[in-house]
Image (spheres, rainbow, N blue to C red):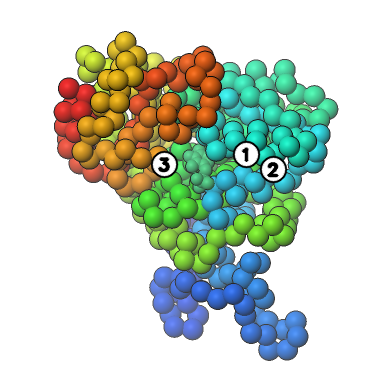
């Protein structure tokens, strides 16, 4: 694709992908190779060894950069491998300020792996970004934001975080997995690094585990590409190809996720047995204005609780859906239902969980792109 300033839907389909030079194949082939033949020592076509470069990965990395409106994309074997690479930018003694309503695996790599290497983490609610500043000291190097958050769908003001990061010369990382580049582009709001678990909406079909980083800065790109190659958490070409294919339909899938999400959020809100419904699109969501400012749609992630916070009732609902599959993960075409207290967030102590609003009866939905009426009927028979 030339550098013309195409709109996002066009970029999603064409960015990074060129007809294969040897055959004209319209889809980038899966270059299943570990090495590349050189004509003479040091004389090659830009590819030497497949940990360092692979043409299928190059196509995907270029596509990722284009759709996140950044300059560089970097692919990893998983979302957490991408987080791991970001952590390796830091040195022992450095401090990170992170949101407290965080993906469980990210919390685990911070506290169980990187604290052992001398990094220090502060966790705070960031619904009001100004709470960040009280944790800043001379050792602070990074602010880590996830928005919307998991599973309580809190919204954090990326521009406000970027202003604080800039003022104190900190790196702002935004995990954009829940929104996807179709709904939110943190680099344009002042973030330095955007992270994706491409396992979720980017891949979109629950068939691949993959991670991505997107940056604008030449320096950050050089450092992260060095870490990617030196530490080697790279994805195979087949996985890159699956993500590249998934990205081509992101816009049509996300439109349907948003449409179905809206219908189901309103259905739940009117259900007599349902207590709280967490969905970014409600006008009375505490940070709905910020969501409207920084997002183009509200997505298909919804959490809800049952009246009386009855765990047995919640387990009954979780065990009786027929279309919503009981499983971890999110962002695929098929609808999933999960129980954060026992599944994704089981490692967080109960008191801590409940203090943050993650009660026993909280149920999380990843609304897929099936027919909304069928999904509502399924929830209706399960909730009773
Ligand atoms: C799943 C997820 C991750 C981790 O990604 P993996 O691909 O599972 O390693 C990180 N952040 C968020 C928000 C996620 O949902």
Place of residue 260 in the rendered image (x, y in percent of width and height, measured from the top left):
27, 36
Read off the residue under disc 2. Answer: 87
Mark 3 C-beta closer than 8 Å to ligand 1 = yes
Q: Quadrant of the C terminus?
A: top left
Measured Cα–Cα span from mark 1 to mark 2? 9 Å
Q: Is residue 354 above or below residue 185?
A: above
Badge 2 local density, few (<14 within 10 Å), some, or many (20+)? Answer: some
Picture quadrant of residue 163: top right
Place of residue 196 in the rendered image (x, y in percent of width and height, measured from the top left):
53, 45
Mark 2 C-beta closer than 8 Å to ligand 1 = no
Q: Is residue 7 above or below residue 260?
A: below
Which element carries disc 2, helix, strand or loop?
helix
Read off the residue under disc 1. Answer: 109
Q: Are marks 1 and 2 in contact (CB under 8 Å)?
A: yes
Q: Are marks 1 and 3 in contact (CB under 8 Å)?
A: no
Indicate which disc, 2 or 3, sits on the residue closer to the N terminus: 2
* Residue 378 seen in render: yes
Place of residue 287 in the rendered image (x, y in percent of width and height, measured from the top left):
48, 20
On residue 222, which mark appears? none
Q: Residue furthest top?
A: 308
Read off the residue under disc 3. Answer: 329
Choose between 370 and 287: the one closer to the eye.
370
Choose between 250 and 125: the one closer to the eye.
125
Indicate which disc, 1 or 2, sits on the residue closer to the N terminus: 2
């Amino acid at each position: 694709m030339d550098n013309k300033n195409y709109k996002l839907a066009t970029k999603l389909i064409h960015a990074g992908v060129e007809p294969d030079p040897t055959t004209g194949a319209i889809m980038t082939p899966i270059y299943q190779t570990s090495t590349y033949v050189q004509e003479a020592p040091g004389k090659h076509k830009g590819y030497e060894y497949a940990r360092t470069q692979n043409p299928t990965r190059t196509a995907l990395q270029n596509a990722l950069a284009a759709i996140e409106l950044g300059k560089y994309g970097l692919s990893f074997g998983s979302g957490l491998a991408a987080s791991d690479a970001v952590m390796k930018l830091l040195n022992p003694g450095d401090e990170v300020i992170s949101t407290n309503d965080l993906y469980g695996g990210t919390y685990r790599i911070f506290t169980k792996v990187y604290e052992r290497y001398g990094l220090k983490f502060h966790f705070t609610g960031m619904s009001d970004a100004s709470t960040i500043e009280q944790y800043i000291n001379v050792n602070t190097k990074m602010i880590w934001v996830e928005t919307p958050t998991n599973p309580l769908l809190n919204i954090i003001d990326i521009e406000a975080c970027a202003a604080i990061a800039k003022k104190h010369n900190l790196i702002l990382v935004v995990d954009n997995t829940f929104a996807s580049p179709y709904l939110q582009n943190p680099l344009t709001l002042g973030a330095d690094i955007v992270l994706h678990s491409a396992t979720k909406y980017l891949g979109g079909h629950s068939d691949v585990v993959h991670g991505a980083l997107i940056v604008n800065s030449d320096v950050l790109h050089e450092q992260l590409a060095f870490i990617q190659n030196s530490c080697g958490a790279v994805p195979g070409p087949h996985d890159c190809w699956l993500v590249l294919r998934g990205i081509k339909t992101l816009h049509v899938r996300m439109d349907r996720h948003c449409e179905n999400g809206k219908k189901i959020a309103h259905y739940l809100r009117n259900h007599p047995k349902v207590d709280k419904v967490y969905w970014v699109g409600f006008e009375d969501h505490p940070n709905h204005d910020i969501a409207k400012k920084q997002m183009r749609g509200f997505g298909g992630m919804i959490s809800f609780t049952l009246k009386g916070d009855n765990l047995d009732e919640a387990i009954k609902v979780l065990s009786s859906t027929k279309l919503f599959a009981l499983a971890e993960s999110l962002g695929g075409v098929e609808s999933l239902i999960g129980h954060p207290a026992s599944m994704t967030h089981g490692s967080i102590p109960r008191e801590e969980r409940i203090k943050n609003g993650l009660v026993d009866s909280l149920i999380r939905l990843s609304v897929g792109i099936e027919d909304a009426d069928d999904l509502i009927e399924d929830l209706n028979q399960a909730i009773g």
